[in-house]
Amino acid sequence: MIKRFIQNAGWPRIIIALFLLALFIAAPFVGVRVDTSLSNTLVRFGMNGVMVLAMIPMVQAGCGLNFGLPLGIIAGLLGATLSIEWNTEILAWLSGLGTQYKISWLNDIFVTAWREPLGFASAIIIAIPIAAILGWFYGKLLNRVKGDEMMIATYVGFSSVSFMCIAWLLLPYKHPTMVWGYAGKGLRTTISVEGYWLHVLSDSLALNIKTDDIHLYIPTGMLIFFAVMAVLVWIFMRTKTGTAMTAVGSNPEFARASGVNVDRMRTISVMLSTILGAIGIIVYEQSFGFIQLYMGPFYMALPAVASILLGGASVNKAGILNVIVGTFLFQGILTMTPSVINSYLQTDMSEVIRLIVSNGMILYALTRKVRAGR
């Protein structure tokens, strides 16, 4: 039984899990609180989980790992900024309507009680069609470069981020909290979501246990949202379309002989991955507290790729369990290593250690991907 578990899990993943466990065990001895570290790991898991989940459709359809995830992230950023831009005007209109016609519940529900959830929902609703359109063009491009999808996807991600650096300055946003103060136009580098939908998921049904010995925070709402998204992806991959996508990824010639439109399935997988990336960045922003524009999305695909590979996925097969395990391991080590080593060395090297650990895990994951592809 133990031998079978080792074969299924793989020694590299077991060693990484044991290393993370060792960090949690060593934490109290160097003055790091285990409960706080576990809370931070769960928060980071919820923040990044949906973006890692976005890898599954493209992997299953044989399009490889989605290094073009920044394209979906850009769609999410557009949804988030447009939500803030229009949210104030819509709420002002609703407030005026409620006052004019003496509809008190209109103010109570839409303007006061449900302001943040509606703002968060509107960001996702706006982002989804944008992501679907961008994903359609992205999928058509990948269909023309079969065999080199991951290399082309990397260029798509990087070039789209660079293009949007110009667009963020030229788009006609007017909201005072988003535009540069001295010019009155062009979006700022970071935009706070406080007052709009900050922690709308994280604090929903959250467990915040504070005693003399325990300080534990569990972002229940964000974890439930990730679970719902994971279940929806799991259900979709078992529908007729999802099964056809998996068949295309496993054996495109057999799928074509069975009457499956290979290019169409690949395009649908890319669109779905882009949409999940857009939703994922909005979930990330509500927890992080800021919308990061310009070069912010540039390298965000690498941690997501590394997470799913650490979870045991390959370039042509991935599942929900790979997402859960990989994201927890990656974010857990990224959280624990700087804290434990800083406390042990009695110096602040958190940023240096974070870069070494995160890039080291990414390097390991990518070398593992090469082996899996051979």
Image (cartoon, rainbow, N blue to C red):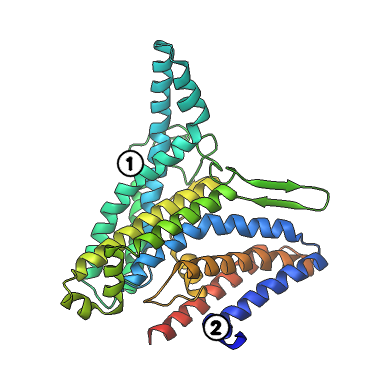
Residue 142 sits above or below residue 168 on the image: below
Q: Residue at x 38, y 27 (%)?
A: 90
Q: Which quadrant holds the C terminus?
A: bottom left
Q: Quadrant of residue 148?
A: bottom left
- Residue 161: x and y in percent read 37, 57
Q: Residue at x 54, y 41 (%)?
A: 198
Spatial distance from mark 1 to mark 2, Cα to Cα?
A: 49 Å
Tell me the element at label 1: loop
Left or right side of 356 for 89: left
Q: Residue at x 76, y 59 (%)?
A: 33
Residue 320 sits above or below residue 231 on the image: below
Query: From the viewer's perspective, is the residue at label 1 or at label 2 nearer?
Result: 2
- Residue 183: x and y in percent read 42, 35
Q: Is residue 223 visible?
A: yes
- Residue 28: x and y in percent read 80, 65
Residue carrying label 1:
171
- Residue 192: x and y in percent read 52, 41
Tell me the element at label 2: loop
Check disc 1 and give the amino acid type: Leu
Left or right side of 354 for 282: left
Q: Residue furthest front?
A: 1
Residue carrying label 2:
10
The front one of 320 and 372 is 320
